[in-house]
Amino acid sequence: MALELPRPIPAKGFLIIRCDGSVEERHERPNNTNVLAAIDARSIDVVRIGKLEPNDVIMVVDDDGYEAHAEQRPYGVEMVVDRARKPINAIATRLYHAICHPGTTHQVVGDVAVFHDGDYETKEALMPYHPWRDLPRGADDIVISITAPDFCCGLVIRDDVVVRAAPIIGYMARLHWSAARVSAYCRKRGWRFEIVEAAPSTTTAQSSSPTA
């Protein structure tokens, strides 16, 4: 499906898509300061929503847009959404659903920023937790190992989205977490994560049993 933005992204600039449907052009290179200020966020999640040659198109959303809590399930811990802290962004949700598996119902809330991957000034500072971003996309699945104090498990990333995960972190696949969100979450929890391999797309994530 072709990427359909409400208006073209300014050269070396970015778009702000507001919850009320309005779209603003910013004619300055996006960076940590102006993007976070523009969408009124303290932390972000990063989603690759498509490609406009020569670069991928990135959508930055407020990672704290939803209030959620952790609940223990038979298959592991699941993050359960309590409520949205910001209004639904219909345009951003449409862009997000276009890259998700059919049937995805999660909605983007809050204002978002959209720009070309190569245009922002401080890529390492904006996405320091995305070590697999330079691996080839589309051809292979990327197998990630996660090691926590009481368990070790794996997941599979395809096109920047979790497509399979061990039961204890199954919520990451069910909610179609982005690779950046997985990595940021691991950092917050103090879990170690690493790329195991880029494998054929039939790879299945394997999990070891929790030790505690």
Image (cartoon, helix red, strand yellow):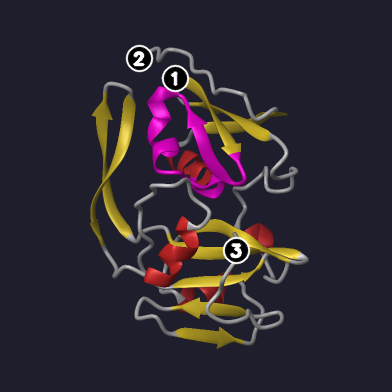
Q: CA distance from mark 2 to mark 1?
A: 7 Å
Q: Is residue 90 magenta?
A: no
Image height check: is 11 above or below 208? below
Alpha-carbon span between mark 1 and mark 3: 33 Å
Specify the quadrant that holds the N terminus.
Answer: bottom right
Amino acid under disc 3? Ile
Instruction: Name the kind of residue labelled 2 in the image.
Output: Ala
**201 or 144, which is in the foreground?**
201
| Image: 160 above or below 204 | below
55, above or below 178, in the image: below
The label on residue 127 is: none
Q: Which residue is mark 3?
A: 58
Mark 2–mark 1 CB contact (< 8 Å): yes
Q: Secondary structure at mark 2?
A: loop
Labels 1 and 3 touching (C-beta < 8 A): no
Q: Would you say 11 lies left or right of 83 here? A: right
Which residue is tagged 2? 212
Residue at figure coordinates x 31%, y 35% from the top left: 78
Q: Which residue position is annotated with label 1?
A: 151
C-alpha separation, residue under disc 2 versus residue under disc 3: 39 Å
Residue 195 appears in which quarter of the rendering?
Answer: top right
Q: Residue at x 63, y 87 (%)?
A: 27
